[in-house]
Image (tube, rainbow, N blue to C red):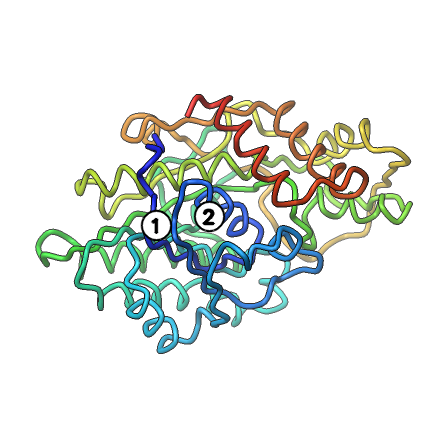
Amino acid sequence: MYKNQFFLNKKVLITGNTGFKGSWLSIWLNLLGAKLYGLALEPPTHPSLFEEARLNKIIENNKIDIRDFKKVKDLVIDIQPDYVFHLAAQPIVKYSYLHPVETWQTNVLGTVNILESLRFLNKKCIGIIITSDKCYENLEWEWGYRETDRLGGSDPYSASKGSAELAFSSYHKSFFSKNYMSKVRIASARAGNVIGGGDWAENRIIPDCIKSWIENLPAQIKSPNSTRPFQHVLEPLSGYISLAEKLSINGKLSGQSFNFGPLSNSNHKVIDIVKKLSKSWKNSSWEINKGESKISEAKLLKLNCDKALSLLKWEPTLDFEKTMELTFDWYYNYYYEKISSFDKCCSQIKEYKSIKDL
């Protein structure tokens, strides 16, 4: 995986590059020598990793709303990318209840806009469409979902991600399969809750804790016993990069979907995450917020990643302890040690690659 010259001087378009995942992916692909282009709105939070790491220096950023088809298409045609990583999304479940129309437009229409824009390319291009583990109809059973399991989702966010997968499948079958002699190859990637340094989004457990503790306030824990398959952000990103590389070589992977989840024993209760982080963070405390929430969110969700192991030779690497160590180390550096955010990300990517033996 990740041949040293594979992305060298390749044109790579990243949608949602100002977000948390998009920023980490930009840094990694920059280390691999890619020529980066971004399509995104302003960073969704302040501070943001995009701003703190000064990523405008390594990527040609284009302020475009993913819902604006003409501007999206014109940019794709102008860039003529070799790779497209589509990460632009409305990613918060709670926000989707408050703004369902925006969520559906961004997550479904935005995906359609990228797929439709790729139809105008008359060159080889690899498109990686990133959705979510929440695209599945979640029955909250104990075993992991496979790529062939039923899509669904009751809340607006989850349903929009399931719909984005349907759009992806339809476009492949209708326009990008071998029957249509298309030079574009596409695949979708499904991952879950990611943590790591540089995330300041609302309604996410670690950013919420860090923001409270910096202000010497107790963190408010709303669903302490909810279980989440937490994984470090670099785990799924390594999967996306691996998928792009393998898809470029093997056209038979086009139109397929892949899960990129954490180790099977990485499901932990929210309260366990808080306790682990608070042991290392000075002056930290928390309290259980017993107020009832009208927002319904899944309490158990796991992915089966056997397909990624079999076809991509990809598997998760970081255990819970290392995931928390990297996350804590990044935030502690940001607030107390002051190594540049960009350099810290680079060093953690290099450390991760050494652990994964890339």
331 or 150, which lies in front? 331
257 or 343, which lies in front? 343
Q: Position of residue 223 (x, y in %)?
A: 72, 42
Q: Is residue 243 above or below residue 43?
A: above
Left-right relation of 179 to 82: left
Label 1 – label 2 distance at C-alpha: 13 Å
At 47% from the left and 34% from the top, the residue drawn is 261
Q: Is residue 307 above or below residue 207?
A: above
At 67% from the left and 60% from the top, the residue drawn is 45
Q: Quadrant of the C terminus?
A: top left
Q: Is residue 305 above or below residue 102?
A: above
Q: Which residue is mark 2?
A: 132
At 28% from the left and 67% from the top, the residue drawn is 116
At 65% from the left and 23% from the top, the residue drawn is 321
Q: Amino acid at mark 2?
A: Ser
Q: Which residue is mark 1?
A: 128
Mark 1 falls on what kind of element?
Answer: strand
